[in-house]
Amino acid sequence: TLAPLTPPFHTVMLGSALRQGAAGGLLRGSIANALSTSRTAVAGLHQVRCMSALPVQPVSRVAQFRKDLADLRTKAKLGGGQKRIDSQHKKGKLTARERVEVMLDEGSFLEYDQLLEHRCFEFGMEKEKYPGDSVVTGQGTINTRPVFIFSQDFTVLGGSLSEAQSLKIQKVMDKAMLMGIPIIGLNDSGGARIQEGVDSLGGYAEIFQRNVLASGVVPQISVILGPCAGGAVYSPALTDFVIMVEDTSHLFITGPQVVKTVTHEEVTAAELGGAATHTKISGVAHLAAPTELEALLTTRTLFDYLPLNNKEMPPRKYTEDVRERQEKSLGLIVPDDPNTPYDMHEIIYKIVDDNDFFEIMPDFAKNVVAGFARLEGRTVGVVANQPLHLAGCLDIDAASKASRFVRFCDAFNIPLLTLVDVPGFLPGVSQEHRGIIRHGAKLLYAYAEATVPKLTVITRKAYGGAYDVMASKHLRGDINLAWPNSEIAVMGAKGAVNIIFRGLTKEQLKAEVENYSRLFANPLTAARRGFIDDVIEPHTTRTRLCQELDALQSKDLKNPWRKHGNIPL
């Protein structure tokens, strides 16, 4: 700061002139000269001082900082180094940044915390510092719609979760909640960073908490692109959809070595927690893709069906497939024999826009079909019984699969289309002992709780309690339709007659079966009670559903206030 000129400066200059003038007898002139000299000196001093006050840029220091910053950014983009990147590629895997580039629209990625580093100094970790640590985080767009993303970097300390990695993930999750934008996690990690101890465990818990808070608020998608073990598995398990890659993805609480030590069972990583295991047996994962690239592109496709948050409607896609399109072949799919199976997929494809159906969990609980489609460009969630498997009966796995899907759709304003051909719940000692009652109640709860538009079409059988559960009119179904060949009854005719009548001859039994079928093996009784809104011809199904869905856009239904319900988990 420039200090002001002090009075002594002027006094000294003037006093000197006065002394010189008195000695020479030129007092007046000397005073004038002194004043002139004083002004000149003051002006000169001001000029010098003003020049010295100008900020002198330390050019070399700033230039060096910029160079250092550029070096750090370059290092951050290399992750664990070129050698580890090459190793990743040899395994057929992309790097964390390459995955982000594939997932997002070109040039849309905005990165956060690229320079953040861990703060651990134990066990020589002060020598293992990498800008950005073991995860890449930020935001971008998928087909112009915003999304937050994090991608674990296996080349940096095996992608292990440190306090720093957790903080980066927490930040994008908090932003996703704040802005109402979906979050996608690309998982490829060896688990907790052991060197950091409880800091790493705390980091996991912070992420889990945010998974729970975001549930039902913004869509959450997890893509497993490598190992995901120990506590790390619970974050994907809490998200809405889990997508794996065949041969390279693994999800398990304890690895094969621990299993062998504790239970003496020998099992490979793929058998224990590979994509096939979790998409076909456990139901932990929703989809599997042959390659990373296909998994990432599948995620983009799934994203297009979903809204950004629970306050918005799903995006509407332009289609040239008009509502008036009628498929005469729909009337030929369901066989006349009620015991002959058929593929429910054929009906779905012929009803929805452009024969396009995105199925969820296609290899798990195949007796029920679930997935996304569109009607006149509007996203709908489709749930359908599949007669090709277990005759379409509901069992434990089918109920769990369908109920979870129904609740997702209800949380994110996605109308539900239910196609019914169900002979009942699967009987058996195993099912009863494993809790078919409790699990079946999940599906009933999910449909009863849902407030989104619910459209139901009975294509053939709707028997017993399963009729009630599958989005019946009694569970606040908005529009319930039936095809002419539908059978709505407590059970099949033969089983009912055997219970009602005893001691009949074969001829009498046959006559009673025919009589029961005439009375109940059709939708007329249900229509007379108002449980069915209309009986329609199969080929008119698409047109009617589009009309009804259009009318239901203004539906406004709210459940009674409560903290939350107590679904039978």
Image (cartoon, rainbow, N blue to C red):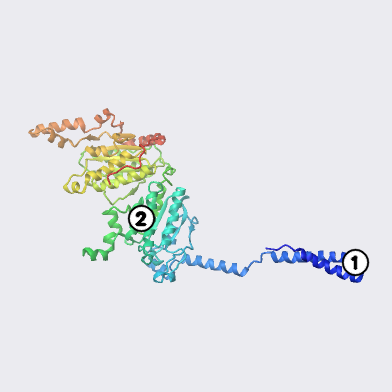
Q: Residue furthest right?
A: 25
Amino acid identity at mark 1: Leu
Amino acid identity at mark 2: Ser
Q: CA distance from mark 1 to mark 2?
A: 94 Å
Residue drawn 32% across the image and 36% down it: 539
Q: Where on the picture, by quarter, is residue 160?
A: bottom left
Question: In terms of depth relative to the viewer, which is nearer, 289 or 8?
Answer: 8
Q: Is residue 518 above or below residue 345?
A: above
Q: Where on the picture, by quarter, is residue 511?
A: top left
Question: In terms of depth relative to the viewer, which is nearer, 211 or 458?
Answer: 211
Q: Secondary structure at mark 2?
A: helix
In which quadrant will I find the N terminus? bottom right
Query: Is residue 143 among the parts visible in the rendering?
Result: no
Q: Give the crowd class for mark 2: few <14, some 14-19, many >=20 residues within 10 Å.
A: many
- Is 141 situated left or right of 380 in this image? right
Q: Check disc 1 and report the residue beneath it.
A: 27
- Is 234 situated left or right of 502 in this image? right
Which numbered tag is attached to residue 563? none
- Is 202 situated left or right of 530 in this image? right
Q: Secondary structure at mark 1?
A: helix
Q: Is residue 394 above or below residue 10?
A: above
Which numbered tag is attached to residue 235? 2
Query: Is residue 28 among the parts visible in the rendering?
Result: yes
Residue drawn 19% across the image and 30% down it: 518
Q: Nearer the viewer, mark 1 or mark 2?
A: 1
Residue 220, image x, y percentages: 39, 51
